[in-house]
């Protein structure tokens, strides 16, 4: 049901009261004098008009005070701020409008609260993860240094070895802090992409060469599968290099001995699809939806030397999103995994 406008309300109330006044005064008049019709009409008109204007004034005052307060509250304006709400139009449905505005405000607030609650939960988890991940290398560094202090320093057999181990843990920490720095930049959109035209095949070849040593240690062969000479794309070469590196390093870390990782390129109309496929241990389907989350690792109990802290794929995903492109994964346990992403052709 539509609400009455203030004018309609004043009109109806005045009509009612004017009618009452007219009837009562006519009855009183009739006790002593014969009824004069013009007096009846005059009484009605005067009382109607007086009531109408008084009501209109009263309602305006009421709305002005209440409406302004509600308006200021829901629009978060400071009391006394210059920006006043619009003038009240007495012939529109003011009450309905206030009601609608309050309902909208409530909806907006609920959404905002849900968003903030999510963010808060995420922040707590994130802090927990960061401190947990940093603890491992810090405790091992502490362990090595304590051993050295308690006599190990003089022991030729272990002193150098322990220092090297401590250095390895420090490098691990630096790597993690760099990754976190990268993620926070990507998430706050502070990462400005340096988009260029470059040859994706040349870049991939370079990365494969730089990882050859690491791959050889695990007896994994890295190769590129394409009959094209070059594929030019429009993207940030440094970031894309990081994407390919992270995917290749994963395929080495989680690959089988004597395994094989192949990078393939497919021509899609405006894009090129890149697939990094391995025949490694594979990933269970239940893990796939969460794989790109920060700190997500399939095997939580795995030793750190076998892999990292679960930031690599989160960074990859952020970089692809910054390029407004997508990344996907398909995998079968025991058979291997394929990570695929698209890039715009140039
Ligand atoms: N090619 C792959 N084969 C099997 N499992 C994989 C593969 N790539 C990633 N994973 C799984 O996904 C998890 C997340 O990978 P991600 O690269 O994000 O983290 P990480 O390798 O553990 O650490 P980081 O890359 O930060 O050093 C890995 O821990 C691993 O369990
Ligand atoms: Mg990784």
Image: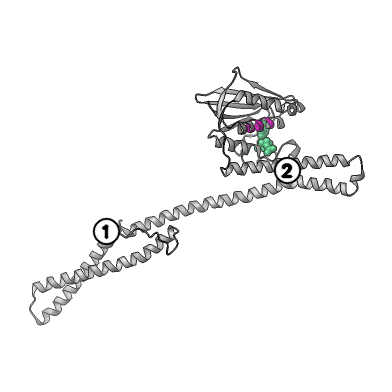
Label 1 beta carbon within 8 A of ligand 1 = no
Instruction: Determine the main secondary structure of the stretch shown in magenta.
Output: helix
Task: From this view, report whether residue 76 is shown above or below residue 331.
Answer: below
- Using the image as rendered, state which of residue 281 and residue 39 is in the foreground: 39
Instruction: Identify residue for label 1.
Output: 91
Read off the residue under disc 2. 173
Provide residue 5's location: percent of width, then percent of height: 28, 60
Q: Is residue 107 above or below residue 282?
A: below
Q: Is residue 41 left or right of residue 296?
A: left
Q: Is residue 231 left or right of residue 302?
A: left
Q: For residue 72, which quarter of the picture?
A: bottom left
User: Is 269 situated above or below 194?
Assistant: above
Q: Nearer the viewer, mark 1 or mark 2?
A: 2
Few, some or many residues within 10 Å of mark 1 (<14, 14–19, 20+): few
Q: Residue at left 87%, top 40%?
A: 160
Left or right of 219, for residue 198? left
Q: CA distance from mark 1 to mark 2?
A: 69 Å
């Amino acid at each position: 049901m539509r609400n009455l406008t203030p004018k309609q309300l004043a009109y109806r109330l005045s009509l009612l009261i004017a009618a009452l006044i007219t009837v009562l005064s006519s009855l009183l008049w009739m006790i002593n004098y014969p009824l004069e019709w013009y007096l009846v009409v005059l009484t009605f008109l005067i009382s109607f008009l007086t009531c109408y204007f008084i009501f209109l004034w009263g309602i305006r005052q009421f709305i002005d005070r209440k409406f302004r307060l509600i308006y200021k509250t829901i629009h978060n304006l400071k009391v006394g701020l210059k920006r006043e709400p619009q003038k009240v139009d007495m012939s529109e449905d003011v009450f309905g409008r206030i009601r609608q505005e309050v309902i909208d405000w409530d909806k907006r607030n609920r959404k905002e609260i849900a968003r903030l609650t999510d963010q808060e939960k995420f922040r707590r988890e994130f802090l927990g993860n960061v401190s947990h991940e940093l603890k491992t290398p810090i405790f091992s560094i502490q362990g090595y240094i304590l051993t050295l202090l308690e006599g190990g320093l003089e022991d030729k057999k272990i002193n150098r070895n322990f220092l090297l181990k401590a250095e390895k843990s420090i490098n691990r920490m630096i790597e993690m802090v760099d990754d976190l720095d990268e993620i926070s930049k990507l998430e706050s959109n502070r990462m400005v992409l340096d988009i260029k035209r470059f040859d994706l095949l040349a870049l991939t070849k370079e990365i494969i060469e730089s990882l050859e040593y690491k791959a050889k240690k695990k007896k994994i062969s890295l190769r590129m599968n394409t009959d094209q000479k070059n594929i030019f794309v429009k993207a940030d070469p440094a970031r894309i290099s990081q994407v390919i590196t992270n995917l290749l390093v994963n395929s080495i870390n989680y690959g089988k001995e004597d395994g094989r990782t192949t990078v393939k390129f497919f021509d899609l109309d405006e894009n090129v699809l890149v697939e990094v496929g391995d025949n490694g241990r594979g990933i269970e389907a239940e893990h796939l939806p969460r794989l790109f989350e920060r700190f997500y690792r399939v095997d939580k109990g795995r030793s750190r030397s076998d892999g990292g802290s679960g930031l690599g794929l989160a960074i990859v995903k952020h970089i692809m999103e910054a390029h407004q492109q997508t990344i996907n994964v398909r995998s079968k346990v025991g058979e291997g995994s394929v990570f695929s992403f698209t890039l715009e052709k140039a």
